[in-house]
Amino acid sequence: MRTVLSLVVLCSCIVVMDAAVSDEHLATAPHPVTHEDVFLMRGLGTPVPDPDGRLAVVAVTEPAYEEDDIVSDLWLIAVDGNTPPRRLTSTPESEDDAAWSPDGSRLAFSTKRGGEEDPSQIFVIDMTGPGEAIQITSLVTGAGRPRWSPDGSRIAFESRVYPGAADDEANKAEKETRDERKYNATAYDFFPVRQWDRWRDDMQTHLFVQDAEPDAQAKNLFFGTDLVAEPGFAGTAGRASDGPEAEWTPDGEALVFAVTTNLHEAARSEVFYHLYQVSADGGEPQKLTDSRDWICRGPKFSPDGDSLYCQYEPITEFAYNMTRIARFDWPGDRDSGLGTPKIITASFDRSVRDITFSDNSRSMYLTANDEGRVRLFKVSANGGDTAALDAASRGVFASPGVAGRNLVARWEDSSHAQEIVRIDPRNGSVIPITAFNTDRTAKLDRQPFLEFWHESARGRRIHSWVTLPPGFDENERYPLVLLIHGGPFSSSLDADHPRWSPHLLAAPGYVVIQTDYTGSVGYGEEFSHNIQGDPLKTPGEELVEAAEEAIRLYPFIDANRQAAAGASYGGHLVNWLQATTDRFKALVGHAGLISLEGQWASSDVIFHREIMNGGPAWGDSPIWRDQSPSTYAASFSTPILLTIGENDFRVPINQTLGAFSYLNRQNVPARLLVFHEANHWIMKGPEAKYYWEELHGWLADYLGANPTTD
């Protein structure tokens, strides 16, 4: 009963807060979702509670179609929800990486305050009274991710510096030298040469410490060490950075961070991330963990300082391994490293995402994908059974933080845009404490997803979401569109999406199905492992089975009008459907491979593809040919819209160009959209809107845009 009440309370609170914002929408019937509705929803960052748990700060982005009109500022939120949020900053540039000082009197963040070409710096604002933020760093290479020392006297931060540059003057001189070059070329002696949408260079992200005062001298803790001289040195890779994820030790004398020293072996080996410690005064970093059987990154200390935790992944014969939480005693015997960790989520058959600690250090709260949702869980800090705070919760929780006796987190579901919520960890009840998007949400004809399960031909339970079109009438019959998620180690979640919105896809009058095929996460490790050696065939069959099951379950689906769309790994599967079935009237594929070998040879990450496909492409594994869509080009027949970002280095443009060549050779109706400034995602407003206009136009040509009545 408590679970049901939690959902009712959540939804009713959203409605009440809507009314407080504006009553105009109450007199207006909800309208079908438009691109403006999806794209202009405010984006919320990670809520960061203050040490007392009374306030939280969150970055709020107000999107716009013109980049100069985008606004992104920090907002201050009362955790009790009794006072409305207030804007803390109001500047042309965005603020990132907010961090409270240990006593809660100051807030540090990174931002730009100069021209467009100026790098971000660390600023600090006094939270005890009015006043402007004060810039405390001034490095020519910029500064980000501030972390306060335990006593609040110093700040650690990251900066991406030139090799061999001993100080800021040397970095400035090297930058000027490179800016003055008359050529634009890079010589590579290392791999990989690209990362997502940027060409890599020889710059490194280093860790700095300085007094938390303006004009203080910043000390580069990594310069001149043997560690950074390793040929494969790098921080943990992200889409836009490769930082060391440093955290202060509880005594404030050192920092613990995670890096690798074998990135240069990435073409032929796993990349091993491990923990190191460096004195806050400098010196050679000491390696704390060392194994080729597992990796350890994302260090976090318990509030009592007795334990060090990390995100742990075993190295196995599988391409995918779940992320678990590992614990070490602290300080332990640091002279010989921390030894073998204790896996505290060993019995939890889900991959851990975000983690945070209770104030008393006895418990940890975490998020994990769970059957198409992202739920909140609790586990003893010493290990044991992991339990959901609400085993029936809907939607997606993200970035939880402890605020006194409560948690605060970002939450959304398929019919409510993201807001910041307060969660009672004792019973899982949820109360929204912001209303940044509720007024816009209430105006949309956007019903919660339906869901169903089917048993596959291989005996696996397969989950699917169903999005109903606006103005839904069960007496009418609607075309069916499969929307295929990427990954493959991902899942279709109980939420909308600013880029791949199922509600926007359904808007012209389509029923949209999202199926978590074999390999998807949130269904146990074995389910994800089952895609190994079978990257496209079985997932493709399960997608077709899901469409057939949906047609059987829902009489309002028109079986004669079906289409499929997907991006990234979903785009791979769209091309596989092109190769293996003619049941669809039309297809839409973004960033999909046409050749397994071609994708391996040109992507920015490659080794895991060998593991997935049973060895290198020149070996004896038949998968490289048997599960490449190009092998079956003679069967291509379905009209298809292909799209790609020219700066996509994860699924490079040659794969889409190759698919377009095969289609033209076979005289199959095809249309190609190349977004010349886009990467793996088409995120600029005007380009994204154009994409959706083309997609809806393509589907309308082959499915029609209106339901039919028997």
Image (cartoon, grey):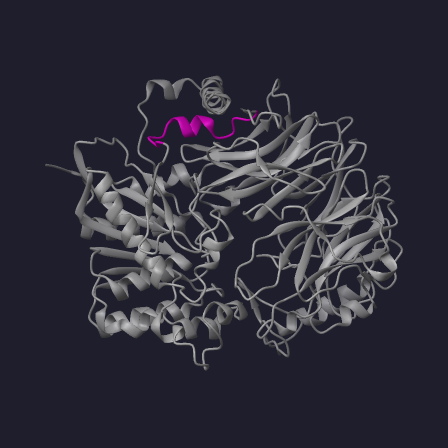
Give the residue at the far left of this rendering.
710
Dividing the picture into quarters, in which one does residue 181 lie?
A: bottom right
Where residue 529 sits: x, y (%)?
48, 59
Which of these two is toward me, 263 or 360?
Answer: 360
Q: Is residue 435 magenta?
A: yes
User: Is 203 situated left or right of 573 in this image?
Assistant: right
Dividing the picture into quarters, in which one does residue 531 lie?
A: bottom left
Where residue 122 sits: x, y (%)?
74, 46
Which of these two is toward me, 503 or 532?
Answer: 532
Where residue 646 sits: x, y (%)?
44, 64
Residue at x 19%, y 38% (from the top left corner): 555
Which of these two is toward me, 497 or 12?
Answer: 12
Residue at x 24%, y 71% (from the top left corner): 664
Which of these two is toward me, 689 or 333?
Answer: 333
Dividing the picture into quarters, in which one does residue 293 lie?
A: bottom right
Where residue 705 sits: x, y (%)?
20, 43
> Is most of the magenta stretch helix, strand or loop?
loop
Check the picture and name the quadrant holding the C terminus. Answer: top left
Q: Which residues are magenta?
A: 433-447
Residue 330 in the image: above or below residue 91 = below
Q: Is residue 675 visible?
A: no
User: Is 350 situated left or right of 97 in this image?
Assistant: left
Residue at x 62%, y 28% (from the top left corner): 425
